[in-house]
Amino acid sequence: MTSPTPRALIAEDEPILAAALAHALQRLWPELDIVATCPNGVDAVHQGLALLPDILFLDIKMPGKTGLEAAEELAEQWPDGTPFPCIVFVTAYDEYALAAFEHAAADYVLKPVNDARLGKTVERLRQRLRVSGSGNAAAATAAPVTAAVTASASDDNMARLLSQLQAMLPPAPRLQMIRAAVGNSVRMIALADVVYFEALDKYINVVCQDSEALIRTSLKELLPQLDPQQFWQIHRGTIVNASAIATAVRDEAGKLSLTLRQHPAQLRVSPLYAHLFRQM
């Protein structure tokens, strides 16, 4: 049961900016309850799941996890049956980058906080709270807006948001081969032979049909170098070769997993990426 008083969480690693945003929100929206102020993305995920606020103000660049990574992890772990909160990204991006937000399912606040711009965000959030009829705005997707819109609870919208914001990054050259250290040698792995990539702390496990190898990088660094038509991210820790997928199976709880051709592994699919496996 959600509280009639809207509840917000602020994640911002600069204390002065976090305080400025909180004070501005208190002036513009006195009934808003700021339930937590988090200094990094890791704490934002922990506090978000513990407190289940209605609104998340997430700084894009934070230590531990970025605002985008925190949003993705929260969406994956958000409890079933509880509407996902509205997201407002706090950013210092330039006008070119902001144009991408105008087409994404999120609102933004430009740093340093400006009362006029923040006031527009507050009005949009209020509107969604009124339309949803509760303290949580997740069901409010029908109200039209003319500028950037607040993220809805829809997995499609969140997936589209992450995809569009990922597209803001500068393009990286496509990989042709994977060079993996195996003992004292370097193994050359053709991308076509890779079944899936799996994040393991500071390494990635490169899984082929009959072997595995570790490379020292992150999925965040690897993903832009892969052909998105061939390699699909299905979880924040997994990228799969689409040609290796045999079936997508949904269990009784609604969780989606993949079976693979000529490999025994079953891979879990995050709700954010379930749209990839809808029937055509």
Image (spheres, helix red, strand yellow):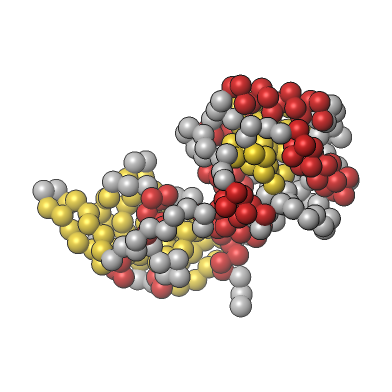
23 lies left or right of 60:
right
In percent of the image, x 22 and y 54: which residue is there?
180
89 lies left or right of 169:
right
Residue 35 percent coordinates (x, y): 72, 26
Residue 127 percent coordinates (x, y): 85, 46
Say whether residue 82 is visible.
Answer: no
**Height in image: 257 above or below 9?**
below
Marker count (numbered):
0
55 lies left or right of 221:
right
Q: In which quarter of the image is residue 260?
A: bottom left
In percent of the image, x 69 and y 46: which residue is there?
107
**Residue ranking furthest to the bottom:** 280
Q: 237 and 94: which one is in front? A: 94
**Residue ranking furthest to the left:** 184
Say whether residue 128 is visible.
Answer: yes
Q: Quadrant of residue 14?
A: top right
**Height in image: 159 above or below 31?**
below
Q: Quadrant of residue 264?
A: bottom left
In percent of the image, x 66 and y 22: which residue is there?
19
Residue 280 percent coordinates (x, y): 61, 78
166 lies left or right of 5:
left
Residue 63 percent coordinates (x, y): 48, 32
In percent of the image, x 37 and y 41: which residue is there?
201
Q: 194 and 217: which one is in front? A: 217
Quarter of the image with the N terminus in it: top right
